[in-house]
Image (cartoon, rainbow, N blue to C red):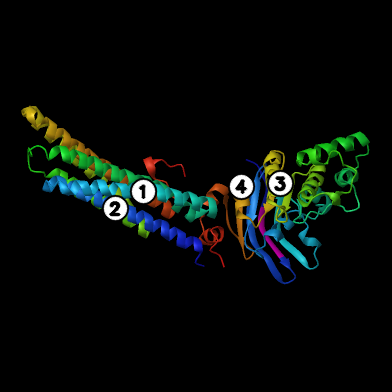
Amino acid sequence: MERKFDEELKELSGMLIKMGSLAQTMIHKSIKALVDRDKVLLSEVYQLEESVNYMHVEIDDFCLKLLALRQPQAGDLRMITAAIKINTDLERLGDQAVNIAQRTESLLERPAIKPLVDIPRESTIAQKMVNDSLDAFIKKDVTLAEDVLTRDDTIDDINNQVFRELLTYMMSDHSTIPTAIDLIFVSKNLERIADHATNIAEDVIFMAIGKDIRHHLSIK
Amino acid sequence: MTKKLIIEHLNAWFGSVQALKDINLNIEENSVTAVIGPSGCGKTTFVRCLNRIHEVVDNARISGKVLLDGEDIYASTSDPVLVRRRIGMVFQKPNPFPTMSIFDNVAAGIRLNGIKKKNEIADAVERSIKMAALWDEVKDKLYKSATALSGGQQQRLCIARTIAVEPEVILMDEPASALDPISTAHIEELMQQIKDKYTIVIVTHNMQQAARVSDYTGFFLLGELIEFSKTPDMFTNPGDKRTEDYITGRFG
């Protein structure tokens, strides 16, 4: 039996997907601005953040109403609690993209100290993690969500490598310090983006099968 | 945790129609167990088997065992009257004795149990009505007719009457389904307050009520027990697709 409530849950999914795609666009544009040294893209990132912030509030409000009016149980309840948490992660994704954009603004004021290799690679993996975690959400695909979780270590490794490499630049030439620090922060922002994708993937698993795998605790 | 009731391979029939099929479950002492399921699933028949009320219907019969503190209430040596004293019941519609006063409604069972001293009876009546969270509302009109009370008050009076004979288990068959939300809240609160003294089994159509009041929930469907688990588990992550469909309202 198709319920009116199912329509509302679909609407909620649709809102999260829309917000997710806005956040993804923000990340994409902020990194592209850095790699292509294109300042114009940065203002687009800031504009998109307003929409993401608006949806953040809108989705929480919708979830609150569904909880109050539908008193959901079982899978419906898990879906809405997961939506509330994913909503927060999506908003943070937007914040990370804004942080990258701000660092990029500062970076574009100075010449590059080296061609960017690891950061674009880190960015590609992190963006794919975000994309796949949202895909897993739409399809309630536990296997894909679990796959996202396995990729977090790669991101951590690249982030560490970026840090070590830029450290050697800073030690050999003090004039590179401002640029290197900005890049270290960008790399850290990407690492945080991957963490948010991981959170989303964990919430998808909870939503789909009711298993809480966070922090490797086995409460249930 | 102590198992107050152990139900083993319980089957029940009305004539040739089988209402319960091979039910196995344990009822924990000092807990509230909710029984849920769609109309005709056998949940009322199930609780009526727990204090031998099922068998009073013509052609009704059962097979299997119901162990109360380890002893089969259906053993040939078991006295149904004694069983019903230990396992009391509150019905869907409040059914106070209409010709009796509020006081006598509660006192009747105490007197039947052979207690004769007036002050002892009065104490037990007061204690029971207080436990049923009704005392403040009726203390000034104890000798008025019970039928003068509201539906919610009558139901709490019936609970007081059940408690008065000091049963060990209280069966409640949709005790709040005919009541307004405030009276329902009273009854639900009452169950929480008295469960440390009794073992409660409640049949309810209202899933939110089962979620609010119970520690364990059993889901019945077409005479079978589909799932029995801790209530928080049942309402967050049911194990069976049919349970999920029922509690999320997809059923039918």
How many other residues sit within 10 Å of disc 3, few (<14), some (14-19) or many (≥20)?
A: many
Q: Earlier in the sequence, mark 3 or mark 4?
A: 3
> Which corner quadrant holds the C terminus of chain B?
bottom right
Q: Which residues are magenta?
A: B7-12
Residue B158 relative to residue A29: left or right: right
Q: Which residue is mark 3?
A: B187
Q: Are marks 3 and 4 in contact (CB under 8 Å)?
A: no
- Looking at the rendered structure, which numbered label has been put on residue B31? none
- Mark 4 to mark 1 CA distance (whole Å): 35 Å
Q: Name above or below for residue B184 compared with residue B117.
A: below
Say which amino acid is labelled 2.
Answer: Leu
- Mark 4 to mark 2 CA distance (whole Å): 40 Å
Q: For residue A214, which quarter of the picture?
A: top left
Say which amino acid is labelled 1.
Answer: Tyr
Pick the residue in front: B180 or B250.
B180
How many other residues sit within 10 Å of disc 4, few (<14), some (14-19) or many (≥20)?
A: some
> Which corner quadrant holds the N terminus of chain B?
top right
Say which residue appears at 6% left-offset and 28% top-offset: A172
Q: Which residue is mark 1?
A: A54
| Marks 4 and 1 share the same chain | no
